[in-house]
Amino acid sequence: MRTYYSKKEIMKKRYIYILLAVSVLAVLSFTIIRYSRRAETYYQLKDRKGSLAQTQEWVNTSKKATELLNKVKLNPQDNKSLLALSALFIQESRITGDHVYYDMAAMKYVNAALKNDTANFEALLYKSLLFLSQHHFADGLTTATAAQKINPYNAFVYGILVDANVELGNYASAVDNSDKMVSIRPDIRSYSRISYLREIHGDYPGAIEAMKMAVQAGLPGDESTEWARVQLGHLYENTGEISNAQMQYMIALDERPGYAYALAGQGRIATAMKNYSQAITLYLQADSVVNDYAFKEELVDLYRIQKMDREADHIAEIVIDEMSKDAKSGQSNENIGHYADRELALAYLKVGKNEKALEHAQLEYNRRPDNIDVNETVAWVYFKMGDYQKALPYVEAAMRTNSKNPTLLCRAGLIYSKTGNKEKAKILLQQGLEKQPNISEELKQLAIKELNS
């Protein structure tokens, strides 16, 4: 028997069905949101190693990171917290040397902030800084230029423009931007960049003077201050003032105990004094605190000097393997992707794989053909391969800023000698060795032998 419903009853049933449908959709939406939040990756601080974990600074940093993470989780639109977290991770990257992880973490939060506000000046600043850390120098320059257009009165953006232009070999633009930077804010950041540009252009006295000003402008014990102090020490090394260099490293360690880069500086001094066992100990200490491939590469050279070839080969292969993994990691994650071809070229040279070294040196050259360090690397690879004529144009390009770096001068002198320009070779080798700079023993002996011949 058919049941007939009144119009009022039909409307009531429809209303109930609509309510049920809305309830089901609400439950599904809540489940999806909850699942997506649970699946969301929130990068956190990693535990520090050694002396870095024993400081009050680490306690404060950990507490701050936890507070910021909680705010971001509660409100993904909180750009202030997103960018504060990014800045914290960028600083942690400098302190620990774990650039791959912390660049990835910082880039995630920077991108989240830019998703909320595509023209956020601070976010663009951090993104350009991260591009430079990842050696994506052209991207860094483009992003910093966009930020500069939004706020042309900020000193920090000009610092990033200096760094990007230096890495790309645009040295005149780098000088212009450093002038703008120091005119807006004369501080440790601007003075240290002036020092580096003076060094590039062969003015070591001026570079030392500017780096002293950078150290004096900083807060003693702060990481950036002691980094500048270590750079001052390295300038002294290049000018043969070993005792002054040693003093800077000692002060840095007093102000910031266990500072890895000061330990490495003392390792270089110990190497210069031919105290190789002490140098190895110092580099191992530095490497236990900060993950910096440069420390491992110095260890490779020291192990070679000590005839510990097995240990040298082992460390060299670790460096190559880790750098290769870092470079490949960016293929599957938009937040990372370090270019390290120049570093890989030098690492392959240390194990005698010259063809692989050339492959990576050329990759780097294709990205930034005007950079003097890149040209020097290509030239040195060709020298090691015995192809001196191919090395010549690259070393000429490397000399175009009139740099007086003793390593470059000695390498250039060797290349000019092998290509028949004995007069120029003699001048360069004499300049490179003149002040007894602290350069690699292998290069020093090659230069002395060639000069004497």
Image (tube, grey):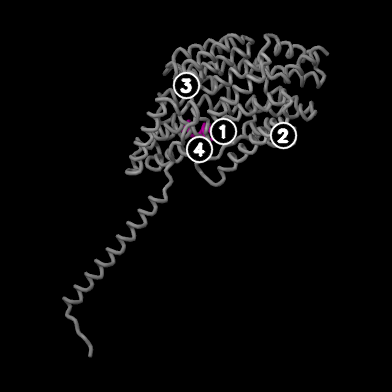
Tell me the residue that label 3 is attached to.
224
Distance from label 2 to label 1 (Cα)?
Answer: 19 Å
Q: Name the residue under label 2.
A: 358
Query: Which secondary structure lies at badge 3?
Result: helix
Mark 3 vs mark 1, CA separation in Å: 20 Å
Viewer-side residue, 239 vs 392: 239
Q: Which residue is drawn at 80% across and 18% down?
A: 417
Work out how far the residue at label 3 is from the one at label 4, CA to CA, in angstroms. 21 Å
Tell me where residue 414 sits by quadrant: top right
The secondary structure type at the circle numbered 1 is: loop
- The tag on residue 135 is 1
- In the rendered image, the vertical position of residue 48 relative to residue 325, given as above or below: above
Q: From the viewer's perspective, is the residue at label 3 or at label 2 nearer?
A: 3
Residue 302 location, x and y as percent?
A: 68, 24
Sequence-first tag of 2 and 1: 1
Dot 4 alpha-carbon crowd within 10 angstroms: few under 14, some 14 to 19, many 20 or more: some
Q: Where does the image place residue 283, in percent across and percent down from the top left?
A: 60, 24
Q: 246 above or below 326? A: above
At label 3, the amino acid type is Ser
Q: Can residue 156 be seen in this view?
A: yes
In the rendered view, tell whether residue 338 sits above or below residue 163: below
Q: What stretch is highlighted in magenta?
A: 131-146
Q: Which of marks 3 and 4 is nearer the N terminus?
A: 4
**Residue 172, picture quadrant:** top right
Specify which label sits upstream in the sequence, 3 or 1.
1
Label 2 Cα neighbours within 10 Å, binned few <14 / some 14-19 / many ≥20: many
Q: Identify the residue at horizontal 53%, vertical 37% (top origin).
A: 100
**Residue that badge 4 annotates:** 101
Quadrant of the rendered structure where residue 408 is? Answer: top right
